[in-house]
Amino acid sequence: MSEDANAIDCLGRLPRLVDLTLHRAYEGETLCFKAGRFPKLQILELGQLKRLKWVRVGEESLSSLQQFLIAGCKLMEGLPLGLQNAIELKFFGFYDMSDEPIHEIQNLNKQSENYQTISHIPEVCIGHWINDLIPTIIKYILLDCNIASRVVLTTRITDVASAYCLASHDFIHIMKPLSYEDSWTLFCNRTFRSNDCPSNLEEISRKILKKCEGLPLGIVAIGGVLALKDKDRIDEWEMILRGFGGEVDGSGELDRIRRILLLSYNDLPHHLKSCLLYLSIYPEDYPIRNVENLLDTWIALGFIEEKEGMTATNIAMRSLRSLKELINRSLIQVKDTWHDGKLKECGLHDFLREIIVSKSKEQSFTAIATGYCTRWPDKVRHLAIHNFTDNPLEGFTSLNCLRSLKSFRYEDPLTTSFLSKFLCGGPKFLKVLDLAGAELDNIPKEVFKLFRLKFLDLSGTRVKVIPKSIGQLQNLEVLILAGTTITELPVETLKLRKLCVLIIGRVGDYSNNFALGGFKSPYGIGKLTFLERLAHMEADSGKIVREIGKLIQLRELSRKFLELSITKLRRDGKELLYSLLRLTNLRELHICSIKEEETLDLQHSISPELGFLVRLWLNGRLERVPEWVISLQSLSTLVLLNSELSEDENAIGCLGHLPNLVELTLHGAYEGETLCFKARRFQKLQRLELMQLKRLKWVRMEEESMSSLHQFFIIGCKLMEGLPLGLQNLTGLKLLGLLDMSDEQINKVQNLDKQSDDYQTISRIPEVCTGHWINGEWKTEIV
């Protein structure tokens, strides 16, 4: 905006404006906030106003302002004039400014008016955006003489910590959540001024504490709120639990946490704000396990910037970098990872979730419809349906702005009839339709009129057939039909030339030997040249196997085929290996024979160079481990199912030379009675599963074998005659699981003589458990 007295001043008449950010939004040299304007404004941020020299706050202006941040306005010549008029100001930040105003603040005369002004502000911060120069300056100014004071920097951004610790990353202390016991102690000390909690408040206190998730600042803050409540009025404590978000939403005593988290949020670039705000659709405490689907959703919604000439793979990598950046800034929590480091589960802290839910509502970015809704929200862009009720509300016509719809599995899942009525309402710009787990018997015809649709997830539904009209969705990039009974695709699918992800089929569990159900592909799938992830396609004829080769030949040279899963492979292994020769960027590969007893035809002189392959599943008989498998330098996860390898000391031992293998599963993969892991083999292995090895009696670990092993599971090996020999050599072992073993084996472990070597061995393992497969899940107990 130009330098005009009314350019910004006109906003001061907005009666409910509480948060104002001006980022590169004003071209003037002076910015004046006039008397009586912005009466309810609480947060003001001025960012990168390149020409700004002076800010003036008039009397009775910004009377409710609590947080004032000026960043990157490098022509500023001094502190804002009239800052003393912002009488409620609690935080003032001067970030990434020139040296002159920073020097002025640091060296204010204690008798000066400016000093008197800022000394009344509870929190005044100055700072710079980290670059390569600042850590170097610190290195030379603060000499390392081993006797001087230490500088401690706290940050929520991992990269900032790394930038300052140039000498050694050992100086970085990553704060972890408090244990439950420590959390409870801190909570009681803060709330009750002692370690004791009144019995009538213990249950409600523990529920409130759970929401803090071990965050010390959160525990202290909520404890301070509760300390003022009547200990005999449990209803007041219930209100705090139910209104947890209200406290964080600025109406309570948790404003310090809000300010800290808002600083992190406001510092995000626009596309990362969109990515983060989108997570507000997830229910409270909901684990985000399908991370790849989340990234595909961000891409489909345009949150990830696409530049001219970028390939789908480049965009996917940018989406992954966005997720890692939000983790780096401590805005997304890593809940769990696979042993190879790949993200398995993530989520949001309750404090942050309440803030982004509030932000999303303000911006009409997301909305959540529940059984308690009386009408659909207006002009919302992203809608989540929780606790669905099959009494559809009126007002579907207000959904013209809708870009995404996601349903969650609850007591009353979303039905076909509701979806049909909903889509008739006209969300014509819908790009993402995620109905995983919905009770759909078929796909309403209205879905195929969503011509802008890019992402369609119908996994876990009762849909059995994909109609020919699927070919109308020519902008579709992701089609997920996992966990359905769909076994065939119509030829019209070949019209989806932008399709990048195609996942269809069922993956079994322990009860059915992890049976894999795939789909019959129409002849000509090689025309889908944008495909990067394909699962689980039946390759029961040489013609289809050759189609995989065509798919690679036809794809653009810059595109990368990343994930392939094929089932029902017959004696066409040689043809498949020729196709794999072209899949040089493959990251994940599943190959399943047509029958368990059928040999996988992979023993040929052809050796595909899969230098980037990190995960490999082979399901079917093997004469021996193929040579090309043993040469996979990047392989981290290997699963061999039903391989029935003969008793040969090198049958499994050859895998011990894979330099980066961290997870190995042998399920029905070995026919011998004794399995030996030799010294100095499997040096990086962290997880080992021996499953359904029907003839196995003894396992032996030599010294210096599997030196990094953390988890060791023996499952369904019912002829085992004792604990593994040499178990004491696994010095880093943290978990030993004995599952679905014979009663005799379990009783033997549970009743070991305390003087025996076996007892002395397993007593050093932090966790030893036994268990059985019951009603579709493992039921375990600690020994």
Image (cartoon, rainbow, N blue to C red):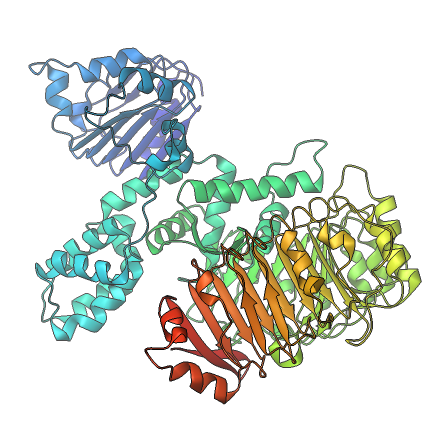
In this picture, residue 396 sits left or right of residue 533? left
Reply above or below: 346 against 328.
below
Instruction: Give the percent coordinates (x, y) of residue 283.
Output: 44, 62
- Which x, y percent locates residue 431? 64, 52
Quarter placement of the N terminus: top left
Q: Is residue 399 above or below residue 301?
A: below
Looking at the rendering, which quadrant does residue 114 occupy? top left
Residue at image point 58% right, 83% down:
718
Q: Nearer the viewer, residue 138 or 496?
A: 138
Q: Is residue 149 above or below residue 708?
A: above
Q: Residue at horizontal 58%, vertical 43%?
A: 319
The answer to whether residue 450 is seen in the rendering is: yes
- Visible residue check, residue 435: no
Above or below, 419 against 78 in this view is below
Toward which corner of the image does residue 458 lie, by quadrant?
bottom right
Tell whether 158 sits left or right of 237. Answer: right
Q: Residue at x 79, y 47 (%)?
A: 583
Spot occupied by residue 493 in the image (x, y as percentages of width and height): 82, 59
